[in-house]
Image (cartoon, helix red, strand yellow):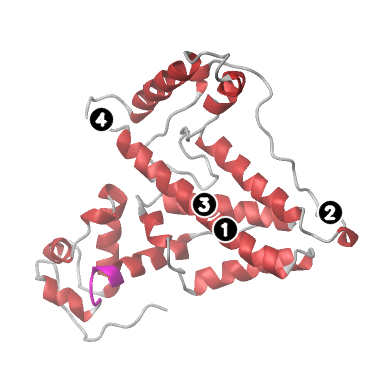
Amino acid sequence: MPPQPRRPSATRGRARGVLSLAAIVDEAMRIIDREGIDEVSMRRIAGEFDTGPASLYAYVANKDELLTHCLRRVVSETPMPRGETWPEVLRSWAVGTRNTLAAHGDIARLSFGVIPEGDGFIEIMERILGAMQSAGVPARVATWGVDVLSLYVAADAYEGWIMGRIFEDGSGRSTEEVGQEYFREFGERLAALPPERYPAIASNLWSMMSGGGDERFAFGVDIFIAGIAAQIPADLGPPARVPAAQIPATQGKSGDRQPPAKRSKRVSAAGNTPARGRRG
């Protein structure tokens, strides 16, 4: 649980009401959602409450501690994974976590190198590991597998934010339009390579350039699930409903790859994030 303030305060700000830990985190989250972590400062937040930075230190020791509270807030928003089988539970958790992170700017960056402790995190881990254990997934495979998958989920969300910023080029065009142009030009450069020297690139160009962010993310999660499933002892039988990872079987143009859109609160609970390309 988040620590209690070291001293009570009844300071009332000009815009955000009574100064409290929750209100400070609220304001920090508003900045992160709009502009990103680097724009958060104790001075800026204090200004929203018509006070000085020293007033905030009754609640948080420094910016790093404040950002830890922000990460815990976001983790608490992650939905409990649903499903009847462990692959369904794991997939539900991956999609729900990605959507939650992507809805809050570059908050995913804070998840690297730390364990986001809290009641919500513990309950979710119990749900995932319990489902995997009951299906016979070995302990190390389950625990290490979830740990590695969590890195994939956070990295995907963070890359989406970065690429959304890259495609905000100040031209007035949408990020989708700028991104389409970027990937089209990249595909054209690859297509211009001599196929006799680069036969593997030439024969796989469409696959390299196809698919949007959601499709590629789901493919990655299914690869993880298939790898975990392969580690279940044979005498326990295959887990129920573990689909083989799929890639499109039809051919298309090298420019079909979809660009990223800026990830924001437009992310839906169902996992329909704006399409974006990824490195091949």
Helix or strand or loop: what does disc 4 sit on?
loop
Q: Name the residue under label 4.
A: 169
Helix or strand or loop: what does disc 2 sit on?
loop
Give the quadrant of residue 5. bottom left
Residue drawn at x 62%, y 19% is 203
Residue mark closest to the camera, 2 vs 1: 1
Calculate the distance from the C-alpha at mark 4 to the C-alpha at mark 1. 33 Å
Depicted 271 relative to depicted 139: above or below: above
Calculate the distance from the C-alpha at mark 4 to the C-alpha at mark 3. 26 Å
Q: Mark 3 points at which residue?
A: 153
Q: In which quarter of the image is the N terminus?
A: bottom left
Position in image of residue 33 (x %, y %): 31, 51
Position in image of residue 237 (x %, y %): 87, 57
Magenta span: 60-65
Amino acid type shown at disc 3: Val
Circle nearer the N terminus (4, 1) = 1
Residue drawn at x 38%, y 56% is 109
Q: Mark 1 points at which residue?
A: 148
Helix or strand or loop: what does disc 1 sit on?
helix
